[in-house]
Amino acid sequence: MSKTLLINARIATMADPSSLGLLNNAGLLVDGDTIAWIGPMADGPDNADTQIINCGGRLITPGLIDCHTHLVYGGDRADEFEQRLEGMTYAEISRRGGGIRSTVTATREASEAELLNQSRPRIEQLLNEGVTTVEIKSGYGLDCENEIKMLRVARQVETEYSVRVMKTFLGAHALPEEYIDRADDYISLVCDQMLPQAHAEGLVDAVDVFIESIAFDLPQAQRVFETANALGLPIKAHVEQLSDMGGALLASEFDALSVDHIEYLSAEDVCGLADKNTVAVLLPGAFYVLRETQLPPIKALREQAVPIAIASDANPGSSPLNSILMTMNMACTLFSLTPVEALRGVTINAARALGLESSHGSLEPGKQADIVIWDLNKPSLLAYQIGINPCSGVMQAGQWRKPFKEGAV
Ligand code: DI6
Ligand code: FE
């Protein structure tokens, strides 16, 4: 029997442009890997040949989407955490050769199997919280062999856990030690060899660049974007995280799927994003861990109706955060997002940030059946509670990953 009818649920469809698209006392029919019907129970479809599951009034949302992570990496950076507590900044640690580069050393030393093993607890935590799509970036290999190794591990995560993994090439994340004072030569390696080779192996869904004083400048980023364009790959960018370099505007000129971090993005530049459909991805974990005080331009983003997504940025340095629910809480508490905005930020807008909005991110007939049943009756509880995981059932592409057990709320 390939049809499943979920009944007696509160469904946050996320199919409305500004709200949760909430349906009370509703049902949802899954046929194969697709949503076949959704609506008020009174209009429910014929039940023949269908397994019926009573959700007992529980909340249903689309599968959650973590649209920005670096969760495949070697080692840890707990020492750096201590240095920052003693007063050193993230940028200082980076300029002294620590930061991203120290993770590059550990990642280069690790085999594919070791990287996969180290990544397991991180991906498993996200999956336990109802994540059905996760983006994973390279960026700690910084040479052909090791960037490709990271992306292969991301692909293994996808096959082994049956989660959708979007793989982003971030070869231009930091300058590797062997290229010090030769950043342009490194960008040539990225454009002429690393990216084309990774793409030829089918390992690249999008291309990202870190535009920052401690990373790459606008002309260098532009070369990477032009290469991505020529290969037909969409782009994303880490921009205005520590300073305003004008990276968001450059990325949006290349029709970026998203610009990420953006604490230092000016309100004027937000207008430039607005006509481009570029998603603003906010990363409250990095803001929190680095004890940043500059807030992203939330008011301007709202006024210009720029779609806002939020993500964990799971990485060993600026955001050792592996919880999408905690990310939602942080986005509300630190950035004053509403719980509705936070949920949109990990569903439909996160799907947009990955170019997946036609098939993912909302519950609508024809979309993929990625569905979470929560042991909650109110959507705002998802962002409000801290340290509780109310996820009680997860369906990925119509298959139960975490089977739901019927019972009263
Ligand atoms: N900005 C970040 O916050 C992450 N990458 C980036 O470009 C941090 C990566 C790290 O510190 O390892
Ligand atoms: Fe990041």
Image: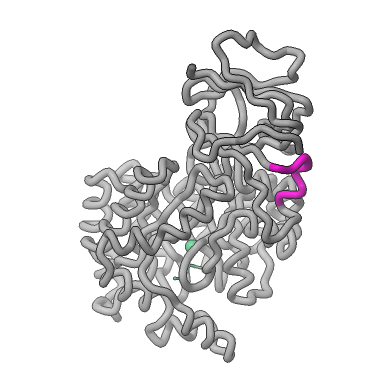
Considering only vertical position in the picture, is 400 above or below 260?
A: above
Rendering quarter of residue 43: top right
User: In percent of the image, x 66 and y 31: which residue is there?
Assistant: 15
Rendering quarter of residue 300: bottom right
Q: How many marks?
A: 0
Q: Quadrant of the C terminus?
A: top right
Residue 408, position as x, y percentages in the image: 75, 35
Considering only vertical position in the picture, is 404 above or below 75?
A: above
- Tell me which secondary structure the magenta stretch mostly adopts: loop
Residue 42, position as x, y percentages in the image: 76, 14
What is the residue that sits farthest to the bottom in this orientation?
86
Residue 225 visible from this viewpoint? yes
Q: Nearer the viewer, residue 128 or 20?
A: 128
User: In percent of the image, x 78 and y 28: which residue is there?
Assistant: 24
Residue 333, position as x, y percentages in the image: 74, 62
Instruction: Based on the picture, tell me whether residue 240 belongs to the magenta stretch.
Output: no
Q: Nearer the viewer, residue 94 or 84?
A: 84
Figure coloring: one colour
Q: Nearer the viewer, residue 112 or 310?
A: 112
Considering only vertical position in the picture, is 283 above or below 97?
A: above
Rendering quarter of residue 232: top left
Residue 74, position as x, y percentages in the image: 36, 69
Residue 348 visible from this viewpoint? no
Instruction: Based on the picture, tell me whether residue 381 belongs to the magenta stretch.
Output: yes
User: In percent of the image, x 29 and y 67: which residue is there?
Assistant: 142
Q: Seen in the image, is 154 located left or right of residue 359?
A: left
Q: Nearer the viewer, residue 306 or 293?
A: 293
User: In percent of the image, x 48 and y 73: which residue is there?
Assistant: 317
Q: Which range is magenta? A: 375-382
